[in-house]
Image (cartoon, coloured by chain):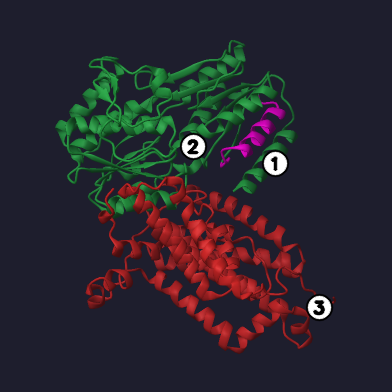
Chain colours: A green, B red
Amino acid sequence: MKLTTFMTGAAVALGLATSGIAADKTKVGFVYVGPVGDGGWTYEHNEGRLAVEEAFGDKVETVFVENVAEGPDSERVMTQMALNGADLIFTTSFGYMDPTINVAAKFPNVKFEHATGYKTADNVSVYSARFYEGRAIQGHIAGKMTKSNIVGYIGSFPIPEVIRGINSAFIHARKVNPDVQFKIVWAYTWFDPAKEADAAKVLIEQGADVVLQHTDSTAPQAAAQKAGNVITFGQASDMAQYGPLPRVSSIIDNWAPYYIERTKAVMDGTWTTSNRWDGISAGMVGIGEISSAVPADVKAEALALRDAIANGSYHPFTGPLKKQDGSDWLAAGEVADDGTLAGMSFYVEGIEGDIPQ
Amino acid sequence: MDISVINPILLVAALMGAATPILLAATGELVVERAGVLNLGVEGMMIIGAICGFAVAVETGSPLTGFVAAAIGGAALSLVFAFLTQVTLANQVASGLALTLFGLGLSALLGQSYVGVKPPKFDDLDLGALGEIPVLGPILFSHDIVLYFALALVAAVWLVLRFTRFGLLLRAVGENHDAAHALGYKVVRLRVLAIMFGGACAGVGGAYISLVRVPQWTEGMTAGVGWIALALVVFASWKPWRVLLGAYLFGGITQLQLNLQGAGVAIPVEYLAMSPYLITILVLVILSADKSAAPASLGRSFHASN
């Protein structure tokens, strides 16, 4: 895989070198962790890239490199993009955090935008979506619809973003179903369809009739479909092709408005470091159509929950809540602050098992 | 923690499925390497097989036709490698790596209109009363035909390599191509055949992922299985039954570690995640203490004029 990315990087470098430098064009680069055809996470980032092209037409040029391994390899890809005249580079996976900071230090005139991370610099912004708001709705539907009271969860890496999603889903599943249990399997990959399918099958064999995923491919959906009587939720992208069963709803990431806004800021020279974290209200997180497989009353409750989160009257992390070890976290009515959420590294009370360290 | 939620019968049945793509690809590569050719393009041939098999299965509605197409696709791609290394005498390592990159790119192109498409269902073989036997039934007699084919293939490769004249010839070409040539055997022709066989096996292995294991098409979906197959051949000392053992060990521990995680066993997940690689390598290294050596001409180019 590393060699693949090396070659793609080299190919991109060649392509850029021959295309010449058009002085008045703003060049925007995108670094992707998976293929644009993954049907999930990377697919939506690429839709955002296409929206930027659509919005600015001739005034913008976009480049992207897909399947870039997290870690040192990504640093080389970013360096290459910066050397080739990119004005703005979006690095779209958590594992690109340190590489982005390192490369940004070497290219002070290039703006960087890192997705889902927390380290900023003069020319590095971070942005993410409040996926946990969507997870709350998934948790609600999962808690209502499970018959075995076992919900399977395919985690990718034990990072705050993923743990936040698990906690949010669990809190809202427990709220409507005190007997519900979560079984969590860590796949240690963002994208590996065979492994994701295996994880889904194992969870189903162990009794789960709801499978939530925080990995990028549609393989768990296919596995659930094959098993039958299991419901799933589209992750990052709608995954509507697996509806109405097993996929009963989804979280849809909508990066296009943000990408357009930030590209515009670079063009106007108004770009400054920022830390954007938008959710359902700003449209960065969308809730996909709740399918006909969900009973009407559950659907109505889920939609009410969505609206309450959108208009700010309800926060998914509202006390009283305790941590897994039984210690107090939030008092009744207290709402979690963004700092705690951004660095979340603990399970809430009721989840079994340990977070891998 | 509750180990009892793990069903050992389902576990063994699942590991056989998980191991099949690796087993098919590794068996094919074993024959290639025994003929003295190092083809690092297994991953590329697998992914081409995955998309060819998927596309044809979707278009014709027949998964079996898909598997045949996957074999043809894999073999066709391997012919590129055969041409480069056997006719133009290009470096085998470089050509193999190029084949992988080419296969990954070409498959993404071919597969563009197949993202999100559902393939026809591939049913398990109905073995009637055999499947009803307790314990053994679900483990041995509840699989699809390609899984049995993979097992038969290992046996066939072992038989041919060990007991037939053709197998002896193949090994002779792999051990010392100059001597084989001096005796009047067609070194290049045999090697091209072996390369095509390896390509066909890798193709079927790839299609097993896209048609049975996952089943759907996504870019890059083989995700390194080809490289594991390549490593397995070396650790298995180029012996078919050890390839089978290695593939089942790897598939088995992969399944077991997911099951243990689901059951909440208090072993750190990182150790569980690395265990398939560690244990497979360890077992095969211990087994290879009998000093089985690589085929002597492995990776060397042959031309009659030298």
Query: Residue at horizontal 39%, vertical 23%?
Result: A341
The quarter of the displayed image where residue B186 is located: bottom right
Q: Main secondary structure of the magenta part?
A: helix
* x, y percent for residue B77: 61, 63
The amino acid sitting under disc 1 is Ala
What residue is pinned by disc 3? B304
Q: Taking the image as drawn, is residue A29 in sight?
A: no
- Secondary structure of the residue carrying tag 2 is helix
Label 3: few (<14), some (14–19) or many (≥20) C-alpha neighbours in 10 Å: few
> How far apart are the alpha carbons under marks 1 and 2?
21 Å
Q: In the drawing, does residue B253 fall left or right of residue B127? A: right
Marks 1, 2 in one chain:
yes
Relative to A298, say whether A208 is above or below: below
Q: Chain of mark 3?
A: B
Give yes or no for residue A77 being in the magenta stretch: yes
In the foreground, B104 or B173: B173
Chain of the residue where label 1 is placed in the rendered structure: A
Cα distance in 3D space between marks 1 and 3: 37 Å
Was residue A183 drawn as part of the magenta stretch in this picture?
A: no
* Numbered range of the magenta stretch: A67-86
Circle 2 sits on which residue? A42
Residue A137 falls in image quadrant? top left
Res A318 seen here: yes
Q: Quadrant of residue B6?
A: bottom left
Residue at 27% from the left image edge and 15% from the top image edge: A334
